Structures are given as C-alpha cells and as structure tokens.
Image: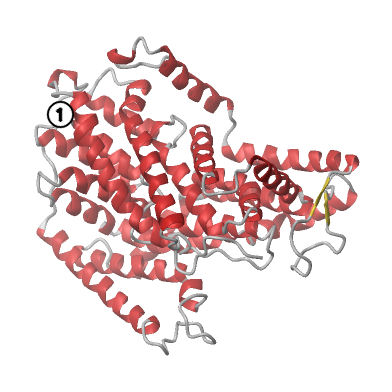
Amino acid sequence: MTIKTPPKLQNDSLFNRFLSSVEFLGNMLPHPITLFALLCLAIVVFSGIADWFGLSAIDPRPEGVAGRDPDGVIEVISLLNAEGLQKIVTGLVTNFTNFAPLGTVLVALLGVSVAEHSGLLSAALRGLVMGASERLVTFMIVFTGILSNTASELGYVVLIPLAAMIFHSLGRHPLAGLAAAFAGVSGGYSANLLLGTLDPLLAGITTPAAQMIDPEYQVGPEANWYFMMVSTFLIAILGTFITEKIVEPRLGKYNENDASEPLDHNIEHLSALERKGLIYAGLSFLLLGILLALTIVPENGILRHPETGLVEGSPFLKGIVAFIFITFAVPGFVYGKVVGTMKNDVDVINGMSKSMSALGMYIVLVFFAAQFVAFFKWTNLGTIMAISGAELLQALGLTGPEVFVFFIFMCALINLSLGSASAQWAATAPIFVPMLMLIGYAPETIQAAYRIGDSVSNLITPMMSYFGLILAVAAKYKKDMGIGTLIATMLPYSIVFFIGWVVLFYIWVFIFNLPVGPGSPTYYEP
C-alpha cells in the first residue's frame, strides 16, 4: 500500500520509514484470534522443551505464602505429554466459562445496550457537543469523546463525523474537529468519569495474572477509577490545547475545493422530545444515585462490608458490574419510553439481543485468550519469565518508579501492531503483572500504567480497528487524504498525551501517594 504524506513530510524519509514499518509489521501479524491460537500451540511445545531442559526458577515469595512450592523451586510443567493432553481436553470448556472478563463484560454491556438502542447515548453526545459555546466547543468535543468510550463504537460512528461537521459549520477546518474527536474517543480511551465495559474486562485479565504470585489476589473493575476520572480532564485539556495551538494552525484555512463531494452544512439538533427524554433519563439516573448512596454512605449501609463496615471489600465494590448494568439500563429505558423508541419489555430485550449478536468475534477471541492464560498458568512459564524479568530489572537497578516509563512506552509500541486493548493485555499481563509485583508494585497500579500506553498510540496505528473508518470520514473533506496524512495530524496528540499522562501518573502515584482507585494499593506486600 502506498502511504501518502503531506507536502511538508515528503522529504522526511525517517517518518516515512516509521509509518511503513508500522504498517508492514501490522500486516505481518495474523488476526488476534489466530495469534492466540498459535500462542497456545507455542506454549504447549515450548513447555515440553523447557521441561526436558529442566528450566526452573527460585521462588522469591516467603515461606507460608499460598501456592508456594515447599522446596522453593518453580519448575516448568510440560503439556507436551499424555497428562498435559488430558489437562487440556478436560479444561477447555471451564477455561472459557470461568474466564472472568467474559461474564462481567456481557452483563455490563447488557445495560449499555439499552441506553444505546433507545437513543439515549447518541442524544447525550449530540447534546453535550452541540450545546457548547463556540469558545468551549473544542474542549467539549474532546471531553465528550472521552465519555463516549462507555458505549463502545458510538464515539467513532456518531461523534467523529459530527465534530467535523460542527467545525465546518463554524468556519473552522473540519479535519481539526475530526482530530479533536478522534483524540478524545481513541487517545483518551481508558479515561472516563464512569465505569464502563473496559474496566471489568481489564480487571478480569489482571486478576489471574496477579494470582500467579498471590492465589488470593483480586482486582475489581473499580481498581483505576480515581486515576481515570482525573485523567479525563487532563486529556480533555491537552486535546483542546493541541487542537487549537498545533493542529488547526498547521492545517490552515479550509479550502472547499479539497472536498471529495458536496458538503452538507445541516446538523441535526436535538428535538424538544429528545430534550424531554434526556431530562427524564437524567432524573432517573439521579434517583438511582440517591438510592445507591443510601446503601453505602451510612455507617450501617447494607452494601458496606458486613464485618468491617467499610466500603473497601464491600458487596458494593464486588458487585459494581451490576450497578453499571442498572445505571445504564434504567435511564436508557426511561429515555426510550419518553421518545417512543422503547415501548415495552420486548423492545428492551431486542436492544440487548442486538448487542449480544454483535459480540460473536469477541466471544471467539475470549475462548482462545482464556486457553492462553490457562496454559501459561499451568506450565509455570509465566511465573518463571516474571521471576527472570524481575531479577533482570533488579540487576539493572530499574526497580523505582522510572520502570513505569519504560513499561508504558513498551505498551504503546506493542499497541502499534496489536490494536485490541483486551488482546494485548491478555497476551502481556501474565508476564508483566507478576514481574512488576515481584519488584513491589500492586497489580492495580500496573494496570493503570498499561491503560496509558494502550491509549496514547491508538491514534497513530493503522491496526486500530476503526482507523479505516476515520480515514474514510477524513477523505470526505480532503480527497487526497492518506494514511500518512492522518497519522501526521494525530502524532502531536500521541506525543503530548504520552508525556502529560506519564507525568500525571508519576505525580498522582509517587509524589502524592494517592490510590489509583478505591482501596487500590500502590505497592504489593505479600
């Protein structure tokens, strides 16, 4: 594929080579599902080879810790034999059904699907953006883009084309509006004010990775909530600054002749009925919030921990996915009832069914990812690799907070070729979570760092699943739009987001010693 670049970059051979390398490496990789299937096969084969050579590691955990071998030696367990085959065959189904992200994501998405199919989420996004003053429109587009990730692809499908139209209608460059929305939706993918489907998904992958070191360890969906709420405002501010001070001046004044087709200046504003629906949905959300507060704010709240009386470790936090479901489903139905998109329980069921039917690819991916995680745990390969990695970090003196800079950067690089957040974390968490736990950091902190790296490079990788859609929308306004042009436009966001988010992470976690989420420790203590 020929990569087009803007005139200023035609002679920048280093930039061109970088883009070509990303695209070449990405195209070399098989589909993520195929990749996990191959990794499963590789683990089986490698476990047999490693067992034959007697690969092992000294268990650094203190005596008495659950799961520690009495001899203090961790040896590879081969799956390339009769016993291994029996374990694989008998565990194939339970590996899949017990994989934590599967159930939690499906339950959370059931609630989100009601809000999405009733039209609530789309109306809320349009209302936030189109109700903003011209002075605040850039900030609201980026901010709304970040919030939209609770509804999966809605930000890509609705907000990004809408942002380009809004900028065009204001006499500003439409590609600047597209870039601002893209930065919020994709660059700020991990940040949000509310918990969404991503939070239980990542927590469900982090938990079994942490249990390689501590079999009793649990990571909840709320593990990064505090840090991601603060990150929402950071990314919105940085995105606004980059759009108005770097991207838009570089694009210059928009030339209507660059459009590939006649442009439509008509933007569909919210109707009176939609506004009424939003008000009633908001009131129902407020009522739910009050009812929920009554169960956790009082000292004798029924959803507090029954023994300690604290919120930490309480049924509220353990059941947070249920509340994600309720707080999306109820306002969604109320909105649909008001505007007429949902009249009865059948409409609610149909909305849920449509979302579930679209998850076929995800469920297949989870099946193979679950086998990969289980095989890694069974063979002890993940634990041995983590111990070896931790020993290397200690030998190099990279055990302080600076290790997270390298970790985040590495996650961002991997994301250039493996764009799925869940696929990348499922492949890397079994190695890096126990590795960084062994040098003293808690899984919740490690997961928060991963989310930064996974988000910031979404903007500049052609392997991101919606990159083609963004390119198609951009080509409407610039007929010779190419991959290089789009990546060059988004590159400033990736660079500044990386620097700003890492600085925030360092200040929040290591200077102010603040938890990344409710009850989330910074350091791991066996």
Q: Which residue is at 52% across, 21% downward?
A: 24
Q: Is residue 78 above or below residue 356?
A: above
Q: Is residue 237 left or right of residue 226?
A: left
Quadrant position of the N terminus in the picture: top left
Residue 203 seen in this snapshot: yes
Residue 51 sits in quarter: top right
Residue 256 sits in quarter: top left
Quadrant position of the C terminus in the picture: bottom right
Q: How many marks?
A: 1
Q: Amino acid at mark 1?
A: Leu
> x, y (%) of residue 320?
45, 70
Q: Is residue 463 left or right of residue 252?
A: right
Residue on which disc 1 sits: 263
Q: Secondary structure at mark 1?
A: loop
Please name whichever residue, 303 or 507, is drawn nearer the observer in this view of the structure.
507
Q: How is the image coloured?
A: secondary structure
> x, y (%) of residue 389?
68, 44
Residue 361 seen in this snapshot: no
Please name whichever residue, 105 or 7, is drawn nearer the observer in this view of the structure.
7
> x, y (%) of residue 61?
74, 60
Q: Which residue is at 78% across, 56% downward?
A: 59
Q: Determine crowd level at label 1: few under 14, some 14-19, many 20+ residues with C-alpha closer than 10 A.
A: few
Q: Is residue 197 above or below residue 334?
A: above
Q: Which residue is at 42% across, 90% downward?
A: 300
> x, y (%) of residue 441?
58, 56
Q: Residue furthest bottom?
A: 300
